Amino acid sequence: MVTRMSELTYAAKRHRIAKAADATLSGQVVGGVGASEAVESLVVLLDVSPSMLARDLPPSRLKAACAANAELIAAKAAKHPRDLVAVIAFGGETLLLHEPAVVGRHVQSLLGCLKSPQCLDWTNFHAALTRAGSLLWGDDGLAAIRGHLLRFLTGLAHRNRPAASRARGALGPDGCVKRIVLLSDGERTQGPSPGPVAERLKAQGVIIDCIGIADRASVDEVALKAIASRNPDGSPRYCFVRDRQKLIRKYRTLAGHIRPVKE
């Protein structure tokens, strides 16, 4: 009898935990806190090659790009404060400007990392995407920020959801939709082709947006379109922007949540 009651008690507790996790991810109120949607994990990739110092997007391409990324971060903090954001600068190598952080709690720190990023020689899309992937999926990545408890809760919720719900795709094992936003003003000048790593990330459910800026003649739009994910109509999630204000508006829209559907 004692064993049977213990099993029933454990099962009841397990059901309550799974139900609470499902409610958190689906937008119900849990413990008096409203949760709008499943959390997103976003890595923004910022080209900091020397050409980004050109002044055709006043005061410079780099400053305009930083302002656009700051707009995205501020919008996420306001609309989706539970989301996770990391910032990577890239040239021939990568620099982690900000580790993955809950945007609502660390908005000032995230904005601060964009004030004066260091320029790096060359442009290596492969290195940038590889570093982003390590944050999204690695042991030291965004899943670790959420902690073992949340992974446990969302794991229970995942197992208790109907198969149709689980099949909607692109939710990582920690319950996060995973995204990358890559901005560049040029073409690959160092490193291997980014194609294989981009395809691997997309196959894992990562949604990739690519933005080309400033001078269309110098931007490798073919490569950026190939890196980008596809919309339901088959068009690439890529756009070219040559105006600072339009760039800021574009990044404001990128702060919104995406509900991916597995093909």
Image (cartoon, rainbow, N blue to C red):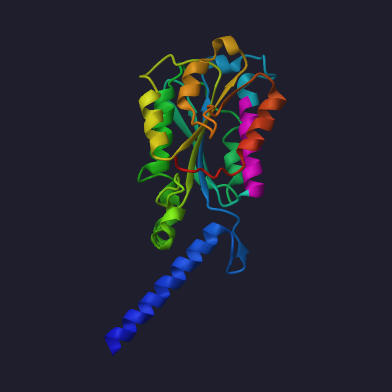
Figure quadrant of residue 151? bottom left
At x 37%, y 19%, the residue is: 191
Q: Front-most of 190 and 3? A: 3
Q: Is residue 93 left or right of residue 58?
A: left
Residue 229 percent location from the top left of the image: 49, 31
The answer to which quarter of the image holds residue 27 is: bottom right
Q: Is residue 70 magenta?
A: yes
Foreground of the two, 216 or 118: 216
Q: Is residue 223 visible?
A: yes
The residue stretch that appears in magenta: 65-79
Magenta segment's dominant SS is helix
Measured as percent of width and height from the top left, residue 50 is found at 53, 15
Query: Which residue is the extreme one toward the right?
Result: 245
Q: Residue at x 43, y 14 (%)?
A: 189
Quadrant for the N terminus, please: bottom left
Q: Is residue 117 above or below residue 34?
A: above
Residue extending farthest top = 217
Residue 22, position as x, y percentages in the image: 49, 62
Q: Can you say whether 166 is above or below 178 in the image? A: below
- The quadrant of the picture occupied by the C terminus is top left
> Is residue 120 in view?
no
Labels in figure, total:
0
Q: Horizontal placement of 5 versus 224: left or right? A: left
Residue at image location 46% in from the left, 26% down from the top:
227
Above or below, 56 against 25 in this view is: above
- 116 magenta-colored: no
Q: Position of residue 256 (x, y in %)?
A: 62, 42
Is 199 rendered above or below residue 137? above
